């Protein structure tokens, strides 16, 4: 995944923060350790509607275009930093599980049976 550092981070109804964008960029590069198949990524940080009973909520969505199926993970919290950390933790777990499934599939190649006469 090679792209400009901040072109794949979208801020909606949130002030742009260089610190937050830098944190997201570092976490995206960390995800590449677990899956080299990431073609494109996009992170959306937003403050959706204001709910009176929940207070201010923030949402972080991580969208990864992988060879195969795309992955989209969303996390909500009362802090944008907690939402980002939760979304990337879930994305990391998802990519690790995906890698483990690929490894087990690769090692479970059926062996052809030899017919005995």
Image: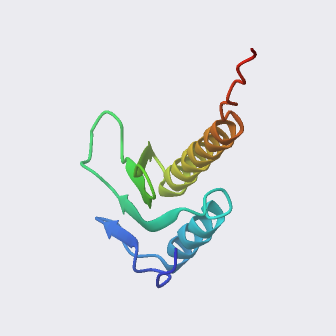
102 relative to 9, above or below: above
Among all residues in the image, which is located at the extreme front? Answer: 117
Among all residues in the image, which is located at the extreme bottom? Answer: 4
91 relative to 52, above or below: below
| Residue 20: image location, x then y, percent | 52, 70
Display coloring: rainbow
Who is closer to the viewer here, 32 or 81?
32
Who is closer to the viewer here, 50 or 116?
116
| 72 lies left or right of 89 | left
Who is closer to the viewer here, 115 or 53?
115
Who is closer to the viewer here, 79 or 98?
98
Q: Name the residue at 56% across, 76% down.
A: 22
| Residue 25: image location, x then y, percent | 55, 72
Among all residues in the image, which is located at the extreme top? Answer: 117
43 relative to 18, above or below: above
Among all residues in the image, which is located at the extreme left? Answer: 49
Q: Name the residue at 66% across, 42% down.
A: 106
Task: Say which quarter of the image contains residue 60.
Answer: bottom left
Q: Quadrant of the C terminus?
A: top right
| Residue 26: image location, x then y, percent | 62, 71
| Residue 103: image location, x then y, percent | 68, 43
Task: Say which quarter of the image contains residue 107.
Answer: top right
Count of residue discs:
0
């Amino acid at each position: 995944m090679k792209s400009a550092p901040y072109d794949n981070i979208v801020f909606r109804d949130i002030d742009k923060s260089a610190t937050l964008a830098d944190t997201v960029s570092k976490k995206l590069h960390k995800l590449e350790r677990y899956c080299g198949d990431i073609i494109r990524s996009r992170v959306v940080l937003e403050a959706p509607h204001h709910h009176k009973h929940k207070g201010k909520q923030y949402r972080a969505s991580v969208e990864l275009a992988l060879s195969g199926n795309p992955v989209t993970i969303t996390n909500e919290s009362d802090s944008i930093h907690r939402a980002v950390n939760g979304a990337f933790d879930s994305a990391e777990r998802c990519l690790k599980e995906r890698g483990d499934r690929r490894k087990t599939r690769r090692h479970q190649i059926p062996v052809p049976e030899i017919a005995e006469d």
